[in-house]
Amino acid sequence: MDYSQKVVEMKNITKKFGAFIANDNINLTVHKGEVHALLGENGAGKSTLMNILYGLYNPTSGEIYINGELVDISNPNVAISKGIGMVHQHFMLVQPFTVAENIVLGTEPTKNVGALDIKKAIDDVKEISAKYGLFVDPMARIEDITVGMQQRVEILKA
């Protein structure tokens, strides 16, 4: 594995909300295999920077490169297509839905009549669950599982 490869590079990212500057010329480089933590006080701009990377906000200025390619991450679908996922600070799960329904939400496998193919959804969840070693019951309702299990679901969604 080539650990020198830059997989994410954010250059001179600035984000303004009116006159308020949330991020001011921020640079972040992540090489393959690295894990980073963003630390700072409340209001320091950590979430804003990650929301830019995930396409929830557009930067006022600056550039984002994914695997060396200049990209315009204008929405989360673009981020996801580039291999970027996000686990939100506050869970974004639909409580009455099952684990499988939450994980496939927005990318639901369907049958030829447009109905949810729940068997395929369950199989997909079992597959990614095994792949990452984060085992969950695909048929459990979110409202019935522990916070720790809900966190696993959020990670698997990402």
Image (tube, rainbow, N blue to C red):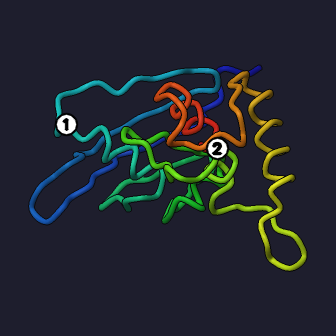
7 or 105, which lies in front?
Answer: 105
90 w.r.t. 14: above or below: above
Q: Which residue position is annotated with label 1?
A: 44
Residue 56 left/right relative to 76: left
Q: Amino acid at mark 2?
A: Val
Q: Which residue is mark 2?
A: 99
SS of the residue under disc 1: loop
| Residue pictured at 76% horizontal, 41% vertical | 125
- Residue 97 is labelled as none
Residue 68 x, y percent position in the rendering: 62, 44
Marks 1, 2: nearer the viewer = 2
Dividing the image into 4 quarters, which one contains the C terminus? top right
Q: Earlier in the sequence, mark 1 or mark 2?
A: 1
Residue lying furthest right: 112
Local SS, label 2: helix
- In the rendered image, the vertical position of residue 12 relative to residue 36, given as above or below: below
Q: In the rendered structure, which amino acid carries the disc numbered 1?
A: Ala
